[in-house]
Image: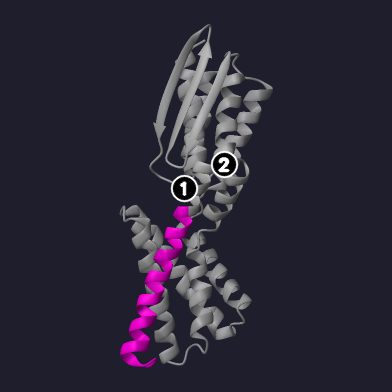
Amino acid sequence: MDIDRLLHLATRAGSIMLSSGGETYRVEETINRICLSYGVDYADSFVTPTGIVVSVSKDYKTYSLVKRVKVRGTNLNKIELINNLSRKITTKPLSFEEIEDELIQIESTNRYSMATTIFFSGLAGGAFTTLFNGNFRDIISAFLIGGLIKYLGITFSKMGINEFFINSICAAIASLLAIIFFKFGVILGVDETIIGSIMLLVPGLSITNAIRDTIAGDFLSGITKGFEAFLIAVSIACGTGAVLSVWLNYFGGSL
């Protein structure tokens, strides 16, 4: 058995899961499960939000691999596919060629189309505005703003712009458009429209994973993800606050 190839395949599966927003303990469990399914004597992994270290032993020989994870996002579909693959391997080990083919297929799995993503992002913005007691015009405005900032966020990500600045810019644009809509009488509630729109930027998954990792005993990952979520929240506050501050202090709340 090619232990080195097994190590690379298991680590590759873990990196796909980690870059898709998987929890630390789930990534470690998946990597270990895949390796142990092929009869190695020992398998252990150490995962952080930005890297993976895996070590396996067979016949008193130890193999190790370090994998750097630079891109992180949210793709629950890929996490589910990797979970299904690991369960399939545990039940009946596949050939390495079959595993590699499935990993390639999972990596190339397309997310929703741009139009679908923008539409449902706008729909989510409108739904959040409803929760904050926005009226019908506020909801429609939040729908439009939410779709726009989602499009801009995806575009900026493809350009390689830092996530902190992406959230700041998108939050600022959301606030600016809400103020413009208010000025022209399109909306009645500036606060409701802004809050509903920027809820799309709130790092809900990072906060959830930070709590789950901390409870699971992965304190390094929990603290790291918690701090990441805090920085994202700060970036949203900076973008929104900057526009509102200029509007209130220099224009007296009117244009």
Q: Residue at the top extreme?
A: 59
Say if the magenta span includes residue 235: yes
In front: 237, or 110?
237
Say if the magenta span includes residue 225: no
- How far across and down, in percent of the image, does residue 6 sit? 50, 19
* Residue displayed at 37% across by 57% down: 163
- How far across and down, in percent of the image, does residue 79 sit? 57, 41
Secondary element at tag 1: helix
Secondary element at tag 2: helix
- How far across and down, in percent of the image, does residue 83 sit? 61, 36
- How far across and down, in percent of the image, does residue 62 sit? 47, 13
Asked whether disc 1 touches disc 2, contact meaning CB atoms under 8 Å apart, the reply is no
Q: In which quadrant of the rendered view does residue 36 lie?
A: top right
Give the spatial CA distance, label 1 vs label 2: 20 Å
Judged by its main secondary structure, the magenta piece is helix
Magenta residues, as a range? Answer: 227-255
Label 2 belongs to which residue? 79
* Residue displayed at 48% across by 46% down: 110
Badge 2 amino acid = Ile
Other-residue count near label 2 (Cα within 10 Å), few / some / many at <14 / 14–19 / ≥20: many
Residue 26 in view in this figure: yes
Tally of numbered discs: 2
Q: Which color scheme does this rendered protein use?
A: one colour
Label 1 belongs to which residue? 224
Other-residue count near label 1 (Cα within 10 Å), few / some / many at <14 / 14–19 / ≥20: some
Q: Residue at the right extreme?
A: 91
- Quadrant occupied by the C terminus: bottom left
> Mark 1 or mark 2: which comes first in sequence?
2
* Residue displayed at 55% across by 21% down: 43
Residue 255 in view in this figure: no
Badge 1 amino acid = Thr
In front: 110, or 29?
29
